[in-house]
Image (tube, helix red, strand yellow):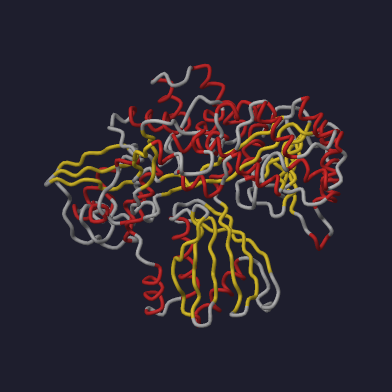
Amino acid sequence: MPIKDTDLGKILSDQSYVSEEELKKALAEAKQRDVTLKSVLTEMGLLTEDLYESALAEHFKLPFAEAKSLQPSPELVALLPEEVARAYSSVVIKRDGKQVTVATSDPGNPDLEEAIRWNLGQQTAVLPADAAQQKGKKKSKGFFGGKKAPERERFGGKVQFVFAPHAAIDALFVHYRKPLATRFQAIINQQRKVAPEIITEIFNDAIELRASDIHFEPQEKIVIVRFRVDGVMHEAGRIPKEYYEGVVNRIKIEGNMRLDEHFAAQDGAIRYAAPDGNTMDIRVSVVPIVDGEKIVLRLLSEYVRSLTLADLGFGEEHRRILEGVAHKPFGMVLTTGPTGSGKSTTLYALMKLRNHPDVNISTIEDPVEYKVPGINHIQVNAETNLTFATGLRALVRQDPNIILVGEIRDGETASIAVNAALTGHLLFSTLHANDAVTAVPRLLDMGVEPFLLASTLEVIIGQRLVRRICPQCRCSYAVAAGEAAKLFPGANKYFPSRGSIRLYRGKGCEACGGTGYRGRVGIYELLLMTPEIEELIVTRASSTALNEAARKQGMASMFDDGFRKMTTGMTTIEELLRVAAPPALSHAKGKRR
């Protein structure tokens, strides 16, 4: 049960987390922008997730349980029916005779304790309203649709509640999940509507596991279903080949694609209503392969629209720079990195800082991934000749303050983007480049004049995503300084020469599927334009010279940023080395190219 803005404001004010003046200003802005008070306070730097959770725990006078302290057995979790656990965001974490400890993120729900008492140890779910039937009270629909509730006993022992973060509670719902293959077979055996129910099971599992993509890969006799979770592929289940045609047709119908087309690539979109009541936009791609039609679904989570720079992993210094740039009247801001490195998400977090009624923001994207109230989105359409270049030309005549170009792919788009930034517009865009520095020669190769580029660029962000260590099973371990120096070339510059080094890893648990990782965080480098950098661009200096100048001026590399996150327990050394190379090594590779 979400807490109301007015209630949250009173809690934070009463506990002196925010002043009356700050609260009044934040409430007014939240109402004006039609967003939550929590999101506004987070943007203002007055509230973090940890402070928010601590404030709620204090308000409800409950002990606060951190995510890593919640490690109940599957048997304990199963004491509550899944429907009740999800409805009340609660999980049993301990049982000692007649005393049960329940972790909840919804302590303000007035029915919470009764729901827990009537359902402890029951096989089927019942709400307190249904339990009232057993006392001869008025009937209520509840979970049983108006039917008489089954006979059961109300738990009479002591129920102790502790407050836990909503994300930590959600992570424990993994204990309820049975293998997809088992559920597929149950659906088939019951001879129900096979395709819709199989798809629903797959979608719900993907959401539960926080998958970014679902792959349907037809083989000769079976179809393999795989999820991409935190950037890594995992097999989720297998569908008998004879049922796959129904699955394909169902997805095509939902995605508004042609059913009679089997030999050409198609794209579509689905809006899916998740079990938690939220809606999710799903991007669909169907491509013919030798054994059938391969489907890839990209899950676009609504919560991404509300992410702040801090949520994405930007440090305090980086946030200060980017917030300053985002409030400039004109110029160009670029994010670079490979596909799937979070470039668009970073730009949306920047645009959110300026998304006010007095600012006109327009985007041209392929595809439009996140629809944000107050922002005008244009979808590229090759069939109508609406390309990045033609769309950008039209946008300039639409009187925008801020323009987002989904990607600069060619010289024409690059030239128009630079000219737009020169004529009083703040322009955000992405570019495929290895790092921030190599974006400059890439744009020059596209035909952009050096003096124009130097005068429009404000900052270039290089980024990658690394997996976070699972908070449920994170542990530390010591490595001798001598051994640490052998972990990667140049490691002796990062680690002390004596003593031991403390590193972190995840042991692997149910919440993270045994991987030791849960979620991702960005590692970044910022190439900020200075007179010296601008002069180097004008003279077409090499990326090596640009990199050396930027390092002298204090630019930390992506590896440096990742190393700091590694030493604070956010990620592992193995994960950092998987996506980023130490500056000396990456510089050497650049010279060979």
Left or right side of 208 for 125: left
| Quarter assignment of residue 256 | bottom right
- Establish if 459 lies above or below 94: above
User: Which residue shows up at 53% across the image and 63% down it?
Assistant: 214
Left or right: residue 154 compared with residue 479: left
Which of 568/423 is in front? 568
How many numbered dots are placed on residues in this image?
A: 0
Q: Is residue 541 above or below residue 466?
A: above
Q: Position of residue 299 (x, y in %)?
A: 56, 56
Residue sitting at 56 percent across and 26 percent down? 44
Front position in the image: 38 or 222? 222
> Whole-percent x and y of residue 16?
42, 18
Q: Quadrant of the N terminus?
A: top left
Above or below, comparing residue 400 to residue 510 in the picture:
above
User: Residue 360 placed where, x, y %?
Assistant: 75, 35
Residue 393 lies, in percent from the top left, at 86, 46
Identify the residue at image location x=76%, y=37%: 427
Taking the view exactly as shown, the residue that stands out farthest to the left is: 97
- Specify whether 335 is left or right of 14: right
In the shown orientation, is residue 267 left or right of residue 481?
right
